[in-house]
């Protein structure tokens, strides 16, 4: 190990031939102002579009609020009303036998159900599948009444 510091000859000094520091500063300054100008133009365009967008968003919120207010009027009678099964009348547009499918009326549908029931006579169902109320859920009011009745019976038995 040497006793005093001696610089090594392995130093790397690179000076590019075509580099102009003044031109580099000038280009950076031009780019800075171009970016600022582009940001100002984008902000101006955004405010113009933003005003329209804000108007339409506010209008949609008002319409949704009115719709919710008109539908939100639930009363105690709504707990006991009968619900109906949704009816789907799907008609394929691109099928080759679309006329046959469109000719399928509710009468033919019930005939198909009856044919199906004749074929599978092993399964006895409590309810008729052709009935339109077959898959309806039990109303919430009826469930509450049954729960109240069970609670009263349990109270009467236990106390």
Image (tube, helix red, strand yellow):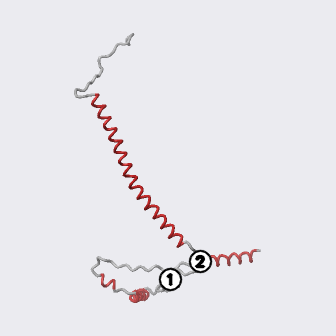
Give the side of residue 2 with respect to residue 58, left or right. Answer: left
Image quarter of residue 79: bottom right
Give the side of residue 157 with respect to residue 9, left or right. Answer: right
The x, y position of residue 82, in whole percent, is 54, 81
The x, y position of residue 11, in whole percent, is 30, 20
Residue at 47 percent of width and 61 percent of height: 58
Residue at 27 percent of width and 80 percent of height: 96
Callout 2: SS: helix
Image quarter of residue 50: bottom left
Label 2: how many Cα within 10 Å (few below 14, some 14–19, many 20+): few
Label 1: how many Cα within 10 Å (few below 14, some 14–19, many 20+): few
Give the side of residue 100 with respect to residue 150, left or right. Answer: left
Callout 1: SS: loop
Q: Check the image and report above or below for 11 versus 39.
A: above
Task: Give the quarter of the figure containing the C terminus.
Answer: bottom right
**Tag of residue 79:** 2
Looking at this view, name the residue that lies furthest to the top: 3
Judge depth for marks 2 and 1 and give the one in front.
2
Q: Which residue is mark 1?
A: 134
Q: Check the image and report above or below for 35 versus 148.
A: above
Give the side of residue 111 with respect to residue 72, left or right. Answer: left
Question: How far apart are the two marked residues, 2 and 1, measured between alpha carbons?
Answer: 19 Å
**Tag of residue 44:** none
Task: Give the quarter of the figure containing the N terminus.
Answer: top left
Q: Earlier in the sequence, mark 2 or mark 1?
A: 2
Residue at 42 percent of width and 86 percent of height: 113
Viewer-side residue, 121 vs 93: 93
The x, y position of residue 120, in whole percent, is 43, 85
Viewer-side residue, 92 vs 44: 44
Q: Check the image and report above or below for 91 versus 114.
A: above
């Amino acid at each position: 190990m040497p006793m005093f510091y001696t610089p090594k000859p392995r130093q790397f000094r690179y000076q590019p031939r075509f580099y102009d520091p003044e031109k580099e500063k000038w280009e950076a300054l031009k780019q800075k102002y171009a970016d600022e100008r582009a940001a100002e133009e984008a902000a101006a365009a955004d405010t113009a579009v933003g005003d329209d967008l804000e108007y339409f968003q506010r209008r949609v919120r008002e319409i949704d609020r009115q719709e919710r207010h008109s539908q939100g009027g639930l009363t105690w009678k709504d707990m006991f009303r009968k619900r109906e099964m949704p009816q789907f009348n799907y008609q394929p547009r691109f099928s080759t036998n679309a006329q046959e499918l469109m000719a399928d009326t509710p009468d033919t549908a019930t005939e198909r159900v009856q044919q199906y029931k004749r074929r599978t006579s092993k399964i006895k169902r409590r309810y008729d599948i052709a009935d339109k109320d077959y898959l309806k859920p039990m109303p919430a009011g009826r469930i509450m009444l049954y729960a109240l009745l069970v609670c009263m019976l349990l109270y009467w038995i236990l106390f």
